[in-house]
């Protein structure tokens, strides 16, 4: 079904938490920008129509163009918005395929097997498919109010049953028209990251539509901090990609 699938990769985020002077998607992992790793993963899964959302400005576009050429990959570049949700919505406007995979450049090492599982579930008739991992840590819900004592603490309100919890990953796969409808319905949320949907699947849930999960992978980790980048470097080395 690869000919009926496009990918939208969110790459407009800053590299601030990584201490980088370039957009996060251009931070190098094993000498290769995260976005190039992410596009290669899509291509290996048979998805060749890729849209990447990027920061505004000619300088950013030039940097992305140079990175893609050096990496030997191709993608259409679309200027993103002020939030990830808004950026994805703009990326969705640029595709015309029946299905779409919405991915994060920060999850650059997502194994092809995970992408394949999402595609297989879409092909089986599911309209919204997300790779996910079982939660192994004990998760507690807390009061949002922090005490004024030192050291600062928050109060536990309850312990959640981790057997029914899952940690979401990307790429998240959707019937394209459904996820566009969900983004239109949730457009007001995209004004700031504080109000934006936590992921695209949450917008589908808000419509009352079903979301199903397939098995994710620990290698599909999100690179957000310098320590994440160090772990990802080890993964690349273990794969023999360095």
Image (tube, grey):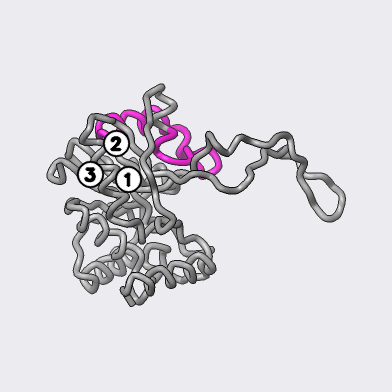
Residues packed near mark 2 inside 10 Å, few (<14), some (14 to 19) or many (20 plus): many
Q: Are marks 2 and 3 in contact (CB under 8 Å)?
A: no
Place residue 13 in its image quadrant. Answer: bottom left
* Residue bearing the label numbered 1: 102
Q: In the rendered structure, are the residues bearing label 1 and label 2 in contact, judged by CB atoms less than 8 Å apart?
A: yes
Q: Quadrant of the N terminus?
A: top left
**Position of residue 57 in the picture relative to residue 138 (left or right):** left
Please tell me whether mark 2 or mark 3 is closer to you in this view: 2
Query: In the structure shown, which secondary structural element does the residue marked by tag 1 occupy?
Result: strand
Which portion, as a residue range, is magenta? 174-202
Q: Residue 48 vs residue 114: left or right?
A: left
| Crowd class of label 3 (few under 14; some 14 to 19; many from 20; radius 10 Å) | some
Which residue is identified by label 2? 174
Asked if disc 1 and disc 3 are in contact, CB closer than 8 Å, the reply is no
Q: At numbered mark 2, what does the secondary structure look like: helix, strand or loop? A: strand
Return the residue at label 3.
94
Instruction: Please tell me which of labels 2 and 3 falls first in the chain.
Output: 3
Q: From the top left corner, tell me how far across and down residue 125 is, in percent.
A: 23, 29
Seen in the picture, residue 35 relative to 237 is either above or below; the reply is above
Upstream in sequence: badge 1 or badge 3? 3
């Amino acid at each position: 079904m690869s000919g009926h699938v496009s990918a939208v990769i969110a790459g407009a985020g800053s590299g601030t938490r990584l201490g980088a002077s370039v957009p996060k998607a251009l931070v190098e992992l094993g000498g290769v920008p995260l976005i190039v790793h992410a596009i290669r993963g899509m291509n290996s899964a048979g998805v060749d129509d890729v849209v990447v959302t990027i920061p505004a400005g000619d300088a950013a576009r030039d940097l992305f163009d140079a990175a893609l050429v050096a990496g030997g990959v191709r993608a259409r570049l679309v200027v993103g918005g002020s939030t990830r949700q808004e950026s994805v919505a703009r990326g969705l406007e640029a595709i015309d395929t029946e299905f779409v995979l919405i991915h994060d450049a920060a999850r650059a090492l997502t194994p092809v097997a995970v992408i394949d599982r999402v595609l297989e579930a879409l092909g089986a008739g599911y309209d919204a498919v997300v790779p996910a991992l079982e939660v192994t840590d004990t998760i507690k819900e807390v009061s949002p109010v922090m005490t004024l004592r030192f050291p600062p603490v928050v109060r536990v309100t309850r312990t959640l049953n981790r057997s029914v919890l899952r940690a979401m990953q990307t790429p998240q796969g959707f019937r394209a028209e459904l996820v566009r409808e969900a983004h239109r319905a949730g457009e007001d949320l995209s004004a700031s990251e504080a109000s934006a949907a936590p992921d695209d699947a949450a917008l589908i849930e808000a419509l009352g539509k079903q979301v199903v999960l397939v098995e994710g992978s620990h290698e599909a980790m999100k690179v957000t901090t310098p320590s994440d980048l160090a772990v990802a470097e080890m993964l690349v080395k273990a794969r023999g990609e360095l």
